């Protein structure tokens, strides 16, 4: 187990380039070795099988036709084979050796006076069915099959050797073995070095991306990973990382703007509190004057408290800390409840707020949706002139539910429409401060709708006015 653990740790410490090269080399080596083995086996079988098959056929003929007499003479199909045996085409080429390895009879078409190198007795230790190849003359090579030949009355079997002329093309097998033995190591070496070289080249963009990634810091988020080929896996990964870096950079920039805007918004009431207090302490004042000063300070303290509450509400909504409890909710009833809660504000400006729409039941969180809708209706009342009409409509669409709030305010200029849901954004800063706004209402609404799986959209109305839509999915 220790050795296996050490090997596993050693392997994990290797680079991807090294591991890919090793796997490529080992896999290619096994494939080529297997291919060479299969190729050699196929060629060898194709060359040797016909001749060996013929030798097996000769053996069957001999075993059926040849018999040994008690006086050790031979009979072929009941006819005695004379000595010397006249050659007949029906005879296979064979030799018969007795238990003492003495030649009993050799039957082949070669003349007795032809100079040949006669083979010795077949070996009994090689085993039955042994095939051998030998020269009997410079121009004659035989392929032989040696098997035991049982003889009645003799305990030790004799040996019979079947022979046929060895085919010349079978001599190519040793040469094929030599070619495979020489070329296989060379090919494997080329595969190892080639695999490492190609792996190094293919993974070079990864090294460049790693080098560039080291240069990316909080102080410099503008750098991006190089994309050598946008169509391969490394290029797509670099592209995804670059998109992520874009989001991080935008998030950091938004965070910087948020911190700057929040600091500014917090600084204003604090400065006012300090200024009012310092002015009040410069000289003796009457009780009524002190009451006025304290009232101004309380007004700024209340504004500061509301700002902190809105910031905490936004942080909770955007940070995913809002718990969502989805239940069946009547959206039309929720809209009427929101209008009723803000009715006093509309009455002060002599505005009319209407709610239209059929009964719509959505599976959503009623508290989060109510707060998002309250923000829109409150903005509509705040920015619409006196005597205006504000319309709230509820409708069920094919893929979801839509709640629309239409006002008669000044609308939002085209150049500002892309920023309406950003924190602390005001299309009219001075007006927003006078009305007590912080530019956080639409940001909170967007965060609530994201938590509910929905969205908020803006649409201008001509000649003036705005339409905000809250869209909830059906599922």
Image: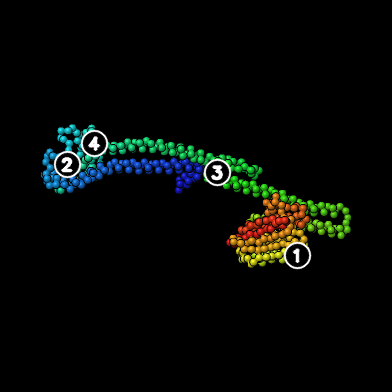
Give the foreground label among 4 and 1.
1
454 above or below 204? below
Q: Quadrant of residue 441?
A: bottom right
The Cα–Cα distance between marks 3 and 4, rounded to whole angstroms, is: 66 Å
Report whether 30 appears left or right of 469. Answer: left
For residue 230, the mark is: 3
Report whether 198 appears left or right of 423. Answer: left
Mark closest to the chain's N terminus, 2 or 3: 2
Disc 3 crowd rating (10 Å Cα; few below 14, some 14-19, many 20+) is few
- Determine whether the residue tagged by mark 1 lies in a helix, strand or loop: helix
Q: Which of 459 and 77 lies nearest the eye of the viewer?
A: 459
Mark closest to the chain's N terminus, 1 or 3: 3
- Determine whether the residue tagged by mark 2 lies in a helix, strand or loop: loop
Q: Quadrant of the C terminus?
A: bottom right
The Cα–Cα distance between marks 2 and 3, rounded to whole angstroms, is: 77 Å
Residue 436: image location, x then y, percent: 76, 57
For residue 344, the mark is: 1
The Cα–Cα distance between marks 2 and 4, rounded to whole angstroms, is: 20 Å
Residue at image location 88% in from the left, 56% down from the top: 285
Mark closest to the chain's N terminus, 3 or 4: 4
For residue 43, the mark is: none
Residue at image location 83% in from the left, 52% down from the top: 278
Is residue 6 at least partly visible in the picture?
no
Give the foreground label among 2 and 4.
2
């Amino acid at each position: 187990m220790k050795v296996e653990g050490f090997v596993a740790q050693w392997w994990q410490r290797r680079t991807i380039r090294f591991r890919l090269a090793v796997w490529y080399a080992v896999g290619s080596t096994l494939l080529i070795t297997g291919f060479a083995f299969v190729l050699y086996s196929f060629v060898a079988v194709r060359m040797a099988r016909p001749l060996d098959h013929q030798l097996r056929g000769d053996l069957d003929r001999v075993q059926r036709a040849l018999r040994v007499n008690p006086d050790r003479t031979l009979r072929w199909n009941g006819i005695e084979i004379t000595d010397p045996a006249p050659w007949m085409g029906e005879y296979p080429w064979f030799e018969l050796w007795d238990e003492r390895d003495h030649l009993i009879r050799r039957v082949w078409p070669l003349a007795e006076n032809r100079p040949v190198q006669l083979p010795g007795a077949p070996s009994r230790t090689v085993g039955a069915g042994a095939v051998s190849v030998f020269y009997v003359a410079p121009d004659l090579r035989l392929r032989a099959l040696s098997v035991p030949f049982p003889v009645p009355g003799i305990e030790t079997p004799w040996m019979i050797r079947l022979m046929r002329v060895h085919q010349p093309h079978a001599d190519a097998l040793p040469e094929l073995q030599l070619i495979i033995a020489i070329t296989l190591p060379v090919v494997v070496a080329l595969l190892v070095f080639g695999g490492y070289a190609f792996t190094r080249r293919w993974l070079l963009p990864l090294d460049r991306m790693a080098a560039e990634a080291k240069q990316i810091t909080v102080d410099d988020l503008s750098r991006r990973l190089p994309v050598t080929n946008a169509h391969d896996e490394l290029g797509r990964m670099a592209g995804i990382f670059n998109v992520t870096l874009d989001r991080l950079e935008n998030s950091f920039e938004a965070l910087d703007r948020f911190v700057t805007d929040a600091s500014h918004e917090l600084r204003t009431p604090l400065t006012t509190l300090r200024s009012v207090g310092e002015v009040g302490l410069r000289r003796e004042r009457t009780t009524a004057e002190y009451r006025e000063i304290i009232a101004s300070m309380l007004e700024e303290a209340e504004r500061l408290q509301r700002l902190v509450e809105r910031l905490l509400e936004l942080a909770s909504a955007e940070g995913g800390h809002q718990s969502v409890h989805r239940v069946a909710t009547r959206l039309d009833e929720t809209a009427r409840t929101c209008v009723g809660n803000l009715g006093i504000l509309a009455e002060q400006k002599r505005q009319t707020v209407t709610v239209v729409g059929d009964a719509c039941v959505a599976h959503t969180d009623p508290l989060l949706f109510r707060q998002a809708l309250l923000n829109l209706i409150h903005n509509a009342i705040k920015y619409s002139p006196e005597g205006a009409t504000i319309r709230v409509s509820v409708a069920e669409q094919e893929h979801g539910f839509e709640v629309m709030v239409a006002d008669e305010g000044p609308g939002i200029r085209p150049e500002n429409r892309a920023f309406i849901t950003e924190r602390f954004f005001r299309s009219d800063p001075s007006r927003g401060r006078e009305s007590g706004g912080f530019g956080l209402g639409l940001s909170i609404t967007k965060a609530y709708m994201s938590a509910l799986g929905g969205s908020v959209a803006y649409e201008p109305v001509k000649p003036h006015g705005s339409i905000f839509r809250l869209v909830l999915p059906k599922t």
